[in-house]
Structure formats: structure tokens, C-alpha cells
Image (spheres, rainbow, N blue to C red):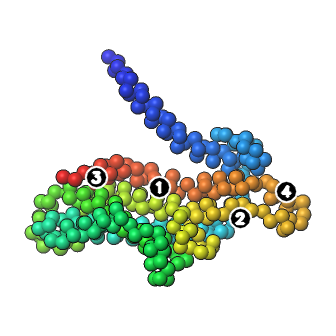
Amino acid sequence: MHKKIKISDVVIFLVVLLLGLSCLLPLLNVLAISFSDSASATANRVKFWPVNFNLNAYKKILNDQQFWRSFVISIVRVVLGTAVNMLLTILMAYPLSKSKRDFRAQGIYMKLAIFAMLFPAGMIPLFMVVKQVHLMDTIWSLIIPTAVPIGNVILLMNFFRAVPKSLEEAAEIDGATPFKILWKIMLPMSLPCLATLALFCIVGHWNDYFTAILYINRTVNYPLQTYIRQVTASFDMSKINNIELLRQYLQVSSRNLNCAKIVVSVIPLLILYPSLQRYFVSGIVMGAVKE
């Protein structure tokens, strides 16, 4: 017996298909431009398939020392930033998940956290603080201002509250300390939520370019996304003194080069995301439900 197809199912399928294409097609266009020749890219003749396929843009990236320096800076930022975010999120979410009977000041700290999330200090005061504590032009200026993501704290706090209270009580009877309960019971049971929050932190640090514009003054210290955003291919014609050098410069346009940089910068997330995707839905749903 065939299942009857509902009109609502068809509409939902078409809407999801259109949304998927709206995300996929721009990426295909960027990928096609990166593999096309300079003339086709400049003339805007590239759509979703490379025109006059070549690898000149990627060959130029291999010789771009600043690109790879920024790539390494972004990796260091992601590792340090995610570690700091997760550590502080866990240490803040666990006590806030307790009842007022177990943690009397829980309500006060919760109100302060919500207030800080709804009413941030603003760009100028934050810039002044970063400058006064001498974090300008350092990797820590990209990490410390966003060290405690309150939204992540609330998700993890609700996840901790969903863990059966009887498990904690049994551990307390056996003499376990609060830190041991957190390490041995709460964190292993919260793996889906932790993986989801780690994904949020990784993507946030990797894709952020604006923070470095504020706090990093020297281009050599730019993370990758800021370097891609700020630096375009600029050719100094005064340095071209022979035909061969002119030919090499004309092989790659700014559009080719920048699209190739974008493609390379997306690869780490494409490798990482599938491994954490299976935790995404359960982590969000369980962390967003408050009993």
C-alpha cells in the first residue's frame, strides 16, 4: 500500500530544497572561480563550473607566506579559544545548575549572567579595557573578550539539570567531591551538549574576522579570516621588469586568488563538522529544555 503524499510535505521539501540551494550555489560559484583563469573570472563568465580550468590561484597561495602564517594563527586561536570557552562554561554552568538550597547565591549569579547577556558593555568600553590591560596585538585579545559565552552556559546548565539527581546523591554517599562528580558523572553524560558547544566555539573563532580588526594593528598578526577580508591581491606594476614576471602576474586576478583563499579556509571546518554533527540535534534539544 503506497503512502499518500501530502501537499504540505511537498511544500516543506521545496522550501528546504530552495534553502539548501541558496547555501550551496554561492559556494559552488566560489569554487568554480578559484579553478578558472584570470580573464574568465574578471569578465564574470564563471557560474558553477570552472572556465579554462587551471590551478594558478592555488599555486600562488602556496607561495603566500602571510596566508599560511594567518592560517596557523587561526588554528592556535581556535585551540586556545575553544579550550578557554569550554573550561569556563563548564565551571560556570555546573554551580548554576544547582538549586537555591544547594547554592544560595545561584539566583544572584544567574541574574548577573542574564543581565550581561542582554546588556553588553559595548565596543568602545571593551576596546578601552583590552588596551589598558595591554592585550592589543596579542592572541589573547581575540580570546579573553569572549571567554564566557553566556548562551552556551545556559544550554549546558539546562543539560546538567536534566541529569538524574539520584546519580549525584549516590556519588555523594560514596564520598565523591563536587569536582569528582562533575568529572566522573556530569561531563561523560553531557557529551552531546559539550560536543555541540565545542562546535559553536570552533566555528565562532574560526569565522570571526571583526575582532582582529579592532584589536590587531599589524597585518602579520591577523588570523586567516581577517587576512582574507582585509587583504586583496594588489600588483605593484613598478616591480614588473620583464615579460615573464608580467605573464605570471596576469595569470591570477584578485577574484581567483580570494576565492581560492576562501576555499582553503573552509576545508578545516568541512573536515571537522561531520564528526560532531551527530551530537548537534540532541545537544541543542536537551540543552534548551528546562524542566
Give the quarter of the figure containing the N terminus. top left
Return the residue at label 1: 272
Instruction: Compare marks 1 and 3 and give the one earlier in the sequence.
Output: 1
| Disc 4/disc 2 C-alpha distance (Å) | 17 Å
- Which dot marks residue 249? none
Return the residue at label 2: 63
Instruction: Compare marks 4 and 2 and give the one earlier in the sequence.
Output: 2
Return the residue at label 4: 247
Left or right: residue 20 compared with residue 43: left
Instruction: Compare marks 4 and 3 and give the one earlier in the sequence.
Output: 4
Task: Specify the amino acid type for callout 2.
Answer: Asn
Q: Secondary structure at mark 2?
A: loop
Left or right: residue 46 compared with residue 139: right
Return the residue at label 3: 288
Task: Specify the amino acid type for callout 1.
Answer: Leu
Query: In which quadrant of the rendered view does residue 114 lie?
Result: bottom left
Q: Secondary structure at mark 4?
A: helix
Mark 3 neighbour class, 10 Å CA radius: few under 14, some 14 to 19, many 20 or more: some
Q: Are marks 4 and 3 in contact (CB under 8 Å)?
A: no
| Disc 1/disc 3 C-alpha distance (Å) | 24 Å
Task: Specify the amino acid type for callout 4.
Answer: Arg
Q: Are marks 1 and 4 in contact (CB under 8 Å)?
A: no
Q: x, y (%) of residue 80?
A: 45, 71
Mark 1 neighbour class, 10 Å CA radius: few under 14, some 14 to 19, many 20 or more: few
Instruction: Compare marks 1 and 2 and give the one earlier in the sequence.
Output: 2
Q: Is residue 253 visible?
A: yes
Instruction: Compare marks 3 and 2 and give the one earlier in the sequence.
Output: 2
Which residue is at 33% across, 70% downward? Answer: 88
Q: Secondary structure at mark 1?
A: helix
Q: Residue furthest right?
A: 242
Task: Specify the amino acid type for callout 3.
Answer: Ala
